[in-house]
């Protein structure tokens, strides 16, 4: 049984885009960032993964809030308007459609409890990008998050799917800084881009997602 299904249609078509795009070093971290994976106004599907209680649902809600606020200010009511469907992510996926970095992005929050995690690998193969939320304040489950993230990255590399790690709950006193999170998770250097955020700052969540997507969008 598949518990997290992305909208039908397979991965977004990328006509005229080479299978292996140009790359550049990301902020001196040693990570190579793919360029030109997508084109402006293209529909892109992002799977939002992470352990239960990692803050995924709050991140999705923040993206919805910020998108709605921007839409009201700009008078934008087109198909990029946020839409919410399906039950809470503890049992089924929840989806929102937002405009990010000039792209029409469908973000799907997939269940994070242990029983649902096997389905993540199928989701990775159906997605254009992955955002993996890690509770940066949860030291006890950091090793578990690292193992699950490692599985996702291994699958993503095989399909050429870029991965963003969102270090959530950075507003808490015990949060591991984004620069130290990779080591705490046991990630190889450059395996994934790591960005800190807090769901109470919707603009910051949007900025993190837009920076990740914009770096991979042809201009």
Image (spheres, grey):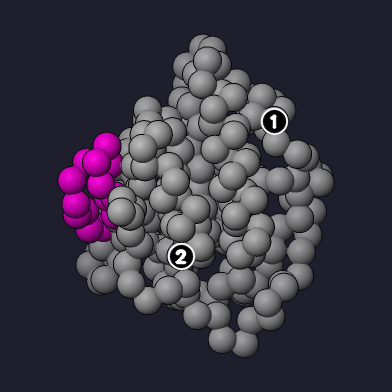
- Locate the N terminus by quadrant: bottom left
Residue for point 75% across, 45% down: 190
| Mark 1 residue element | loop
| Position of residue 7 in the picture relative to residue 118 (left or right) | left
**Pointer 1 or 2: first along the chain:** 2
Q: Are marks 1 and 2 in contact (CB under 8 Å)?
A: no
Give the vertical position of 115 relative to 22 (above or below).
above
* Residue plotted at (76% across, 70% down): 22
164 vs 122: above or below: above
The residue that disc 2 covers is: 126
Secondary structure predominantly adopted by residues drawn in magenta: loop
Please tell me which residue lies in front, 182 or 147.
Answer: 147
Instruction: Identify whether 195 is placed above or below 5.
Output: above
Disc 2 crowd, CA 10 A, few/some/many (<14, 14-19, 20+) = many
**Disc 1: which residue:** 186
User: Residue 17 at x, y = what percent?
Assistant: 64, 81
| Front in this rendered view, residue 143 or 104 | 143
Task: Report if residue 75 is visible in the image.
Answer: yes
Q: Position of residue 201 (x, y in %)?
A: 40, 34
* Residue that protrudes farthest toward the top in the picture: 173
Residue 65 quadrant: top left
- Image side of residue 205 versus residue 193, left or right: left
Looking at the picture, tell me which residue is in the foreground, 59 or 68: 59
Label disc, if present, on residue 158 of the rendered structure:
none
Is 92 included in the stretch rendered in magenta?
A: yes
Question: Which residue range is magenta in the image?
Answer: 82-95
Q: What percent of the width, then of the height, locates residue 205?
A: 45, 42
List the single residue furthest toward the front: 1
Q: Residue at x 64, y 29 (%)?
A: 185
Considering the numbered disc 2 on the image, is that residue within a helix, a strand or a loop? Answer: helix
Q: Is residue 70 visible?
A: no
Residue at 69% from the left image edge and 80% from the top image edge: 18
């Amino acid at each position: 049984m598949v518990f997290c299904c992305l909208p039908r249609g397979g991965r977004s078509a990328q006509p005229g885009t080479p299978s292996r795009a140009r790359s550049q070093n990301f902020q001196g971290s040693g990570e190579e960032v793919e360029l030109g994976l997508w084109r402006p106004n293209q529909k892109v599907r992002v799977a939002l993964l992470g352990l239960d209680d990692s803050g995924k649902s709050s991140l999705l809600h923040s993206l919805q809030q910020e998108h709605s606020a921007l839409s009201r200010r700009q008078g934008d009511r087109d198909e990029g308007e946020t839409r919410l469907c399906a039950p809470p992510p503890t049992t089924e996926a929840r989806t929102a459609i937002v405009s990010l970095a000039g792209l029409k992005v469908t973000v799907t929050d997939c269940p994070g409890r242990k029983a649902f995690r096997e389905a993540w690998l199928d989701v990775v193969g159906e997605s254009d990008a992955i955002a993996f939320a890690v509770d940066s304040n949860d030291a006890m489950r950091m090793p578990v998050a690292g193992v699950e993230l490692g599985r996702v990255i291994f699958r993503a590399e095989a399909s050429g799917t870029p991965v963003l790690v969102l270090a959530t709950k950075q507003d808490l006193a015990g949060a591991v800084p984004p620069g130290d999170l990779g080591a705490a998770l046991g990630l190889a250097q450059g395996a994934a881009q790591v960005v800190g955020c807090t769901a109470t700052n919707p603009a910051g969540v949007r900025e993190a997602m837009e920076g990740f997507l914009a770096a991979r969008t042809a201009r």
